[in-house]
Amino acid sequence: MKISVLTLFPDLYSSFLQTSLVKRSQEAGRIAVELSTLFSYVEPKERIDAPAFGPGAGMVIRPKVVEKGIQDIEGKHGRAYRIFFSPQGTKLTQPLLHNIKRNIEKHDNHCLITAARY
């Protein structure tokens, strides 16, 4: 299974990917993980985010940046099952993970994950 992770901070995943079951799965060839940074899809000194709309403070990642990242990754590996993590999303449970796995298998075992909410 190919897992592509599109994130602002790929270095945060490095230690996790080198531990326990995840490391052994990679060594056995069961999974392959590719980390990509969203900063690769903007020009130097170009902002990756924009002010949020509505009440409250905050910034959101610009949709064009996420779109460029998705197009680049899918251009290399083919169409992927896309997962967008968000605090407002569905609670991640074991039955949901089984459902996600079945959907990934329908997409040539390629999954694209991003925590970028836009």
Image: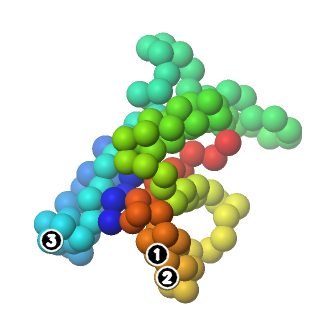
Amino acid found under the numbered disc labelled 1: Lys
Q: Residue at x 54, y 56 (%)?
A: 82
> 101 left or right of 91?
left
Q: Residue at x 85, y 38 (%)?
A: 54
Say which of 110 and 86 sits in front. Answer: 110
Residue 10: x percent and y percent?
35, 44
The numbered dot on residue 98 is 2
Is the residue 99 above or below the residue 16 in the image? below
Query: Distance from label 1 to label 2 (Cα)?
Result: 5 Å
How crowded pointer 1 is (Cα within 10 Å; few <14, some 14-19, many 20+) is rated as some
In which quadrant is the N terminus drawn? bottom left
Query: Distance from label 2 to label 3 (Cα)?
Result: 21 Å
Q: Which residue is mark 3?
A: 28
The answer to whether residue 23 is visible is no
Is the residue 10 above or below the residue 100 in the image? above
Residue 58: x percent and y percent?
69, 37
Q: Which residue is mark 1?
A: 101
